[in-house]
Amino acid sequence: MSLLKNLFKTTKDTPAFAVETVPGTIYAPIAGNAVSLSEINDGVFSEGILGQGCGIQPSAETIYAPFDGTIVQIADTKHAIGIMSPDNIELLIHVGIDTVSMNGKGFHVHVATGEHVKCGQKLLTFSQKEIKAAGFRSTVAIIVTNPDEHQTIKLCSTGPINHAEQLLIVR
């Protein structure tokens, strides 16, 4: 390995940025515009059928881990990832509306089921261009799928958000 590669080497466990995490906090997994759950244009999400949370209309194409945790599920079609926190937050990160029908085209997963990840670690990349070309929206749904195990799930604010900013508080 060259000197430069040794100097700048990273592993897939290296977070893209350092975040001092607070238990019960879900950090934005992507930059964009945070919206309430009811504003997601899909009844499965907007009606809370899968759980409680919010959406982000993305301005980027990389999903980062929203907290330290374990990857518990990756959709075969690569458009959704499930992650569990040490404080029992079960989270679904779902990229796009109806993107399951893209069968993985335009999506690339950077982690594996069972892998322990750190907040800020790259989980998934996707192409907004390919999602739009397929006729779909790229809204990212961030859903706590075990809301009955928590007292409150609160969206910190709507509007512009950078990844790693506080997004949801779960108690």
Image: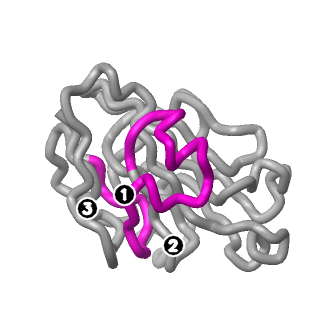
Looking at the rendered structure, the kind of residue marked 3 is Ala
Taking the image as shown, residue 123 lies to the left or right of residue 134, namely left
The answer to whether one can see residue 25 in this image is yes
Looking at marks 2 and 3 on the same chain, the residue that comes earlier in the sequence is marked by: 3
Q: Is residue 40 left or right of residue 54?
A: right
Judge by depth and name the residue closer to the eye, 37 or 58.
37
Label 1: which residue? 120
C-alpha separation, residue under disc 1 versus residue under disc 3? 7 Å
What is the quadrant of residue 113 in the picture?
top right
Query: Residue at label 2?
Result: 58
Q: Are marks 1 and 3 in contact (CB under 8 Å)?
A: yes
Say which element carries label 3.
Answer: loop
Magenta extent: 26-53
Question: Which residue was labeled with disc 3?
Answer: 18
Where residue 68 sits in the image (x, y, percent)? 32, 41
Which of the two discs, 2 and 1, labels the residue nearer the N terminus?
Answer: 2
Q: Residue at x 83, y 60 (%)?
A: 105
